[in-house]
Image: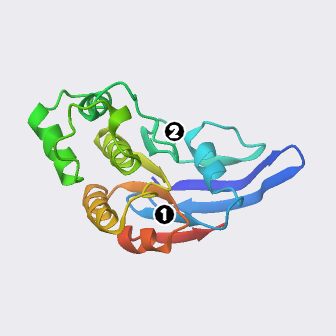
Amino acid sequence: MDIRVEKLCKAYGEQRIFQDYSAVFPEGKVSCITGSSGRGKTTLLRLLMGLEQPDGGMIYGLEGARFSAVFQEDRLCENLSPLSNLRMVCQKRPAKQRLIRELEEAGLDGCAEKPVRELSGGMKRRVSILRALLAEFDVLFLDEPFKGLDAATYLKVTDYVREQIRGKTVILVSHDPRDMERLGGAEFRL
């Protein structure tokens, strides 16, 4: 089912973020929300996920949906290993070797058992992405998911993500036009 936003309104005090905003995000496709800083991209994701409530308007098509997300912050359990962080979201207990393969696919060879706090920022980012992809979801929300990745890692990770999200409903927020090019999908400019 498509996600429909109708006449959405949201303000923080005197600062109006949305006034009668409407959009349709198609099921099984990537929708890329773009726009300059402060335009409400992250706020829109938070409204769609139910982390904030709109002041007016309606959101349809998310009733009973399972969400997974990559936030701007990594939101990992720093004292746990990448392997343990991944296991936390898996409803079925995957074999350790499968999770290690997933880590290797994202260029995280040899760090499966290290505490996350010892990883670089780019490595933590990739663990966050993997964790979101391994959770069972109907809608995947990505908020600047590839920030902080060097050029070679960016290409490898976007290739991996593109394969994993094929045919799934994804809402991507990004300042980087390459993200939409790499993952495909329609642009929604705020």
Is the C terminus in the top left, top right, bottom left or bottom right quadrant? Answer: bottom right
Please count the marks in the image: 2
Image position of 45 with respect to 160: above or below: above
Query: Which residue shows up at 71% across the image and 58% down it?
Result: 38
Q: Residues within 10 Å of mark 2 (few under 14, many from 20)?
A: few
- Left or right? Give the position of 146 relative to 153: right
- Left or right? Give the position of 108 relative to 117: left
x, y percentage for residue 131?
33, 40
Residue nearest the viewer, comparing 82 with 10: 82
Q: Residues within 10 Å of mark 1 (few under 14, many from 20)?
A: many
First in sequence: mark 2 vs mark 1: 1
**According to the image, what is the colour scheme of the structure?**
rainbow
Q: Which residue is mark 1?
A: 31
Element type where label 1 sits in the image: strand
- Disc 1 residue type? Ser
Farthest residue in the right direction?
A: 14
Element type where label 2 sits in the image: loop
- Left or right? Give the position of 139 relative to 93: right
Image position of 110 with respect to 26: above or below: above
- Disc 2 residue type? Glu
Residue 116's label in the rendered image is: none
Residue nearest the viewer, comparing 61 with 133: 133
Query: Which residue shows up at 41% across the image and 75% down it?
Result: 181
* Cα–Cα span, label 2 and label 1: 19 Å
Image position of 136 with respect to 30: above or below: above
Q: Which residue is mark 2?
A: 63
Q: Is residue 95 visible?
A: no
Query: Which residue shows up at 58% across the image and 55% down it?
Result: 4
